[in-house]
Image (spheres, grey):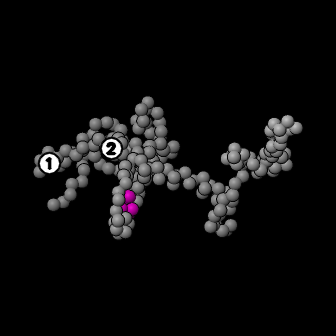
Amino acid sequence: MITKTRRVAGCLHTEITTDDAGRPALAWHFDEDVLQAEAAVDGWYALLTTLTPEQAGPSEVLRRHKDQGTVERRYGDFKGPLAVTPVFVQDNKRVAALITVICLALLLFCLIERQVRRALGGDQKMRGIYPGNQRVRPTGRMILYHLSDLRLRVTSATDPPVIAITRGTQLHLLDLLGLEPTHPRWPET
């Protein structure tokens, strides 16, 4: 049982016998040929792809596989900061509509992060996002966290609305996003 769960059944050979007095005895040894064959391919793994050799060579296939973490992180965003909770719908049209709305929210989340990082240029790092003021790449989660405290103040019908900015990080993020905080857009009536 242990050899199967630890995946050493192919190289560990055991033999249970009894001696003349009827006591059990366990004899075991490792198969050196199997161990050497395993060591020869250690660190190698197969990647199955639909790409032809003309479309991507082995190094390109590996690079694309290694970039899969970016996609996986978006699934984490979907489960985390977007705060998607279980919704029980029975109609297929509503399920499709819900998935569409969720995908649009995730797309918007990614585009905000991408815009800020592109506007930063170079190493795509900034200060003020995390405690300790270290330079880090801003994530969509932290960008939305800092912008969540913004408030729109409407003073009167004739005066334009004003965005209340409480921290310099918010102003910097709005600038990176290409938004003018002093002149917010007001819907035409």
Q: Amino acid at mark 1?
A: Asp
Counting residues from the start of the chain, the first of labels 2 and 1 encountered is 2
Establish if 102 lies above or below 170: below
Q: Amino acid at mark 2?
A: Leu
Residue 160, given in percent of the width and then of the height, sits at 17, 49
Compared across the picture, whether 24 is left or right of 188 comes to right
Residue occupying the far front of the picture: 21
Question: In the picture, residue 21 is in which quadrant?
Answer: top right
Residue 147: which disc?
A: 2
Local SS, label 1: loop
- 127 is higher (above) or lower (below) than 106: above
What mark, if any, has residue 159 been given in the picture?
Answer: 1
**Left or right: 156 as drawn, with respect to 38:** left
Residue 159 locus on image (x, y percent) = 14, 48
Nearest the camera: 76 or 124?
76
Q: Residue at x 60, y 56 (%)?
A: 65
Residue positioned most to the left: 157
Q: Which residues are magenta?
A: 98-102
Q: Which mark is residue 11?
A: none
Measured as percent of width and height from the top left, residue 2 is found at 69, 44
| For the residues bearing labels 2 and 1, Cβ distance under 8 angstroms | no
Q: Nearer the viewer, residue 3 or 40?
A: 3
Q: Nearer the viewer, residue 108 or 36?
A: 36
Q: Is residue 122 visible?
A: yes
Label 2, label 1: how far apart the Cα atoms are? 24 Å
Q: Residues within 10 Å of mark 1 (few under 14, many from 20)?
A: few
Q: Is residue 100 magenta?
A: yes
At x 48%, y 39%, the residue is 136
Q: Secondary structure at mark 2?
A: helix
Residue furthest out toward the top? 132
